[in-house]
Amino acid sequence: MARKPMVTRTIQSTVATIVCYNTVTNEMVTHELELARTYANNDKLMKVAAPVLEPANLKPVHVLKTEVIRTLYGMPEQSFIEHAEKLTDSEAVEPEN
């Protein structure tokens, strides 16, 4: 059987263990969160983590540890064409962290 053409992308993400304050129970809890990209320091990570945690009534307080992981993602070319957003050349440039 012939191989299906695939579109692949290796993405770096940060797995962070964060101490959070639960605004409903008034308790401190530890929460593990995976965020796309890597972050230069904990302050930048906390800014990105806050909007993700707030719907769960969690306020990030302190980063305990972080780990950068690399994951290879892929999908068939035809699925990519059907679901991907078309970009102009100027839109294809990735922003800096």
Image (cartoon, rainbow, N blue to C red):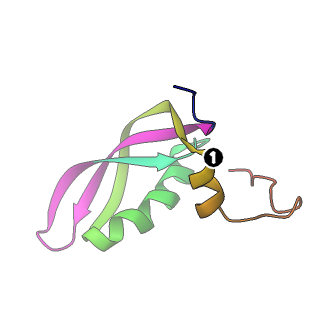
Q: Left or right: 88 with respect to 85?
A: right
Q: Residue furthest front?
A: 1
Q: Residue furthest right?
A: 89
Q: Nearer the viewer, residue 34 or 74?
A: 74
Residue 49 falls inside the magenta stretch: no
For disc 1, the marked residue is 77
Q: Left or right: 61 with respect to 37?
A: left
Residue range corresponding to the magenta coloring: 6-31
| Secondary structure that dominates the magenta span | strand
Measured from the top left, where is residue 74 in percent x and y? 54, 39
Q: Nearer the viewer, residue 6 or 10?
A: 6
Q: Residue at x 56, y 37 (%)?
A: 12
Measured from the top left, where is residue 60 in percent x and y? 35, 58
Q: Residue at x 25, y 71 (%)?
A: 57
Looking at the rendered structure, the secondary structure element under dot 1 is helix
Q: Nearer the viewer, residue 26 or 86?
A: 86
Alpha-carbon neighbours of circle 1 within 10 Å: few (<14), some, or many (≥20)? some
Q: Residue furthest left?
A: 25
Measured from the top left, where is residue 88 in percent x and y? 85, 64
Q: Left or right: 97 with respect to 54?
A: right
Q: Nearer the viewer, residue 54 or 41?
A: 54
Q: Left or right: 40 with respect to 27?
A: right
Measured from the top left, where is residue 73 in percent x and y? 52, 38
Amino acid beneath label 1: Glu
Residue 28 falls inside the magenta stretch: yes
